[in-house]
Image (cartoon, grey):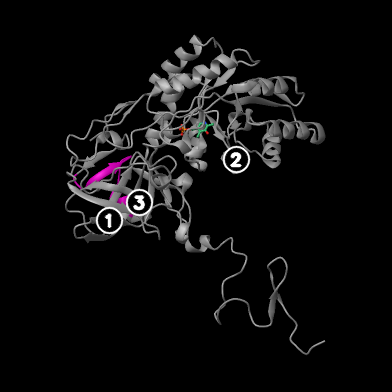
Amino acid sequence: MAANQRAGGTVSPASSASSPVDAGLLPLTAEVRPEGLAVGGVLLADLARCHGTPLFVYDEEQLRQRCREAVAAFGPGNVAYASKAFLCTAMARLAHEEGLLLDVASGGELRAALGAGVPADRIVLHGSNKDEAELRTAMSAGVRHVVVDSFDELDRIERLHAEERLPVVRVQLRVAPGVAAGAHEAIRTGGSDSKFGFGLAGGTAERAARRAADSPAMLLEGVHAHVGSQVLDARELAAGAAAVARFAAGVPGRRLTVGGGLGVAYEAGQSVPSFADWAARVHAAVRGAGWDGQVGVEPGRSIAARAGLTLYRVGTIKRIEGVRTYVSVDGGMSDNLRPALYGSRYEAFLPRSPRADRPLRARLVGKHCESGDVIIDEAALPADLRVSDLLATPVTGAYGYAMASNYNKLPRPAVVFVRDGAARVVVRRETEEDLLRLDADGPAGPAGPGVLPGARRSGGGDLVAARPLGTA
Ligand SMILES: *Cc1c(COP(=O)(O)O)cnc(C)c1O
């Protein structure tokens, strides 16, 4: 089952709802061996045995290949990896090594990118409400450019330049083109009723452009928009790009960035454009709108999603007569929030038998104290599924670990990269000690809970021994 889907294309529709998982949903280097599925030359069962579950597994070759395909389609210097999809030191380095810029949207993401050794001039700062500290770090470090999002932010940049003498910063103007696309309201960002950007309607964006162009604190180098995410029709992305291009053509600056948003197939039957399709549509649309400068993109999901999968252990199978079957695994909404947040759909398979038919219908759920903790409603699963089976959900490489939480005090999973028969842990599993490391109150001593007798808390939360009663 060397996965056949190259840059884009259709994941073949399930011939019947009970058919095996489609190879097009698996990582590129997936191969079926007698013992089960291997990715990057490593058996998934061995990874689970060595590193535990839940576990995020990434096909490093596929991550690199996706980066290269994006650069080939849009040109070097024109692709920024949207790090919010999945970011850790190893991922920041990988994207940088493959020639991508890094798009970060907070001080924390900026810190991760700089900490990974990505040069500041390869980093782009986004965000709809950047605070002074984030702007200060970006301006002092000398990031490639800042995508400015509001008049308040222009004020803050001017103040930092005038009062703290921070260097002049290159900026792109984020505009809301009045075109929104995407699979769910929460990820449609480009409409005029949006917290993002300066509206093209009513002349707001035009005013912002004049202000930035005249400002001594910044150099306006172009326009930016991002219309939405998980867009499966490249024509929608092109329509957004055309709307911004018309505006950009009348503004100083030679760079137009049209955001990310290219969708991926999460289920059999979904058709996805390739990077080359996306590039062709966007280039034609912006040229048609009168733009002849650079065109940049910021793919996140389309780089990371299919390269990653999640391994879980099945713990409980509950058959409720006349109702349904529940299959519970050892993770859930704390490692994959997308089903609860967006109603997103996934598929599942058993690494021990990736070619098995899946006639069983069950609700695949996590271990959290919520009925909404559903990973797949009506999951198709093999009939011989049993407790202690290893189960995998493919295409979880984007917005999975990135949105992970400690809900119910679950430690966040480890992340491993596999390649050429070797696995390396790139993010270690959280421990139960990690879960308490921010608690200002220390653990109870052997004698019992809480504060020692005769001790009190100082204002800072430190334990201070009180003088024994009756002494001076
Ligand atoms: C989220 C986001 C992206 C990436 O979106 P994907 O759909 O993951 O490709 C790119 N640019 C901006 C500004 C974003 O907010």
Name the residue carrying label 2. Answer: 106
- Residue type at mark 1: give it: Val
Residue drawn 74% across the image and 32% down it: 155
Residue that extends furthest to the front in the rendered view of this protein: 202
- Residue type at mark 3: give it: Val
Report if the beta carbon of the residue with label 1 is closer than 8 angstroms to ligand 1: no
- Give the secondary structure at mark 2: loop
Bounds of the magenta segment:
34-48
Locate residue 107 relative to residue 400 in the image: left or right: right
Q: Are marks 1 and 2 in contact (CB under 8 Å)?
A: no
Between 366 and 398, the one lying in front of the other is: 366
Of labels 2 and 3, earlier in sequence is: 2
Residue drawn 68% across the image and 82% down it: 454
The image shows residue 393 at horizontal and vertical percentages of 32, 45
Badge 3: how crowded within 10 Å, few (<14), some, or many (20+)?
many
Q: Quadrant of residue 51?
A: bottom left
- Residue type at mark 2: give it: Ser
Residue 327's label in the rendered image is: 1
C-alpha gap between disc 1 and disc 2: 37 Å
Which of labels 1 and 2 is toward the front? Answer: 1
Of labels 1 and 3, earlier in sequence is: 1
The correct choice, above or below, for 341 with respect to 288 in the image is below
Q: Magenta segment: does it hold 36? A: yes
Between 421 and 113, the one lying in front of the other is: 113
Residue 200 visible: no
Of labels 1 and 2, earlier in sequence is: 2
The image shows residue 390 at horizontal and vertical percentages of 28, 53
Name the residue carrying label 3. Answer: 374
